[in-house]
Amino acid sequence: MGIRANSRSAVSQTVLLRDESGGVVTLTLNRPAQFNALSKELLGELQAALETMAVDEGARVVVIAGAGKAFCAGHDLKEMRANPAKEFQQSLFGQCTRVMMTLTEMPQPVIARVHGIATAAGCQLVAMCDLAVASEDARFAVSGINVGLFCSTPSVGNVGRKQAMEMLLTGDFIDAQTALERGLVNRVVPANQLDAEVNMLTDAILSKSAVAIKSGKQMFYRQLELGLADAYALATEVIACDMMTEDAQEGIDAFIQKRPPQWRGR
């Protein structure tokens, strides 16, 4: 049974839903009437949930999904217009930035389960997750330019420079296959196979050492900021430390003995 991310009793009032099964925690953005736009309340709930997951050793993988017809339509423009003060805008975008940074800093892999539209900060959310699986009907855009805003924060991500700039300057949608070709998502499947494909990824991750995944994810994002020599030095140190763990010794013994490994670490 799902566990709500806040204490309110009415599901319709709960902007973020949480469901946990076998080490996989699914966080579902739950503002379907607003296409899961990222209000301050939703961002706050998402930040709190991610921070909780980060220290939960029972949580091995996090999946972020959207309720209703869309994954996420970005920031809530009505809320932004209703609060015109610069202080509110700075607070909102700072809050969003903390969520995006937490996705890369937490030890668990985070997978975006994308259907419908993912626009502006919703597209940024996809880009900042470690992995993303999209249905064939998914569409992506950084569309702030269409309402007079350059999507500055969504410009920070993992799409190539010229491809990202084209999206930012035109606000045009790209389809799921184009998103795959540009590296925004890992896999594209028919809508009726979306959950099965996400499950294939989570199952693959769950079968691996949590210790190795934690150290590996941390190293991956740290080395992106380094020059080549420093990146290799960091990678060398991390893999040497990994070799000292019980899991690595068990994994090598299991390989040599031709048996499944029995992971021990967290």
Image (tube, rainbow, N blue to C red):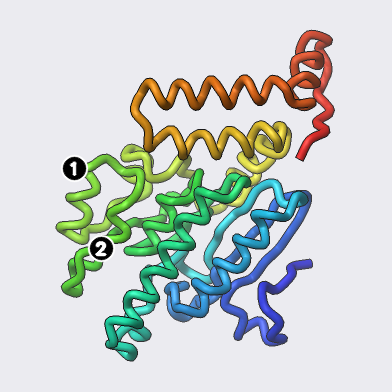
The residue lying toward the viewer, choosing from 13 and 89, is 89
Seen in the image, is 125 located left or right of residue 154?
A: right
- What residue would you read off at disc 1? 162
The residue lying toward the viewer, choosing from 101 and 165, is 101
**Image point 71% across, 37% down: which residue?**
210
Question: Quadrant location of the C terminus?
Answer: top right
Q: Element at badge 1?
A: helix
Question: Quadrant location of the N terminus?
Answer: bottom right
- Residue 144 appears anywhere in the view: yes
Residue 60 location in percent, x, y? 70, 46
**Image point 57% across, 73% down: which residue?**
45
Residue 124 location in percent, x, y? 38, 57
Q: What's the amino acid at mark 1?
A: Lys
Examine the image and state in which quarter residue 141 appears: bottom left
Residue 167 location in percent, x, y? 22, 53
Seen in the image, is 111 located left or right of residue 156?
A: right
Above/below status of 186 relative to 175: above
Q: What's the amino acid at mark 2?
A: Cys
Q: Element at badge 2?
A: loop
The residue lying toward the viewer, choosing from 220 and 16, is 220
Between disc 2 and disc 1, whose residue precedes? 2
Residue 247 location in percent, x, y? 76, 27
Residue at mark 2 to residue at mark 1: CA–CA distance = 15 Å
Seen in the image, is 145 located left or right of residue 93?
A: left
- What residue would you read off at disc 2? 151
Examine the image and state in which quarter residue 197 appears: top right
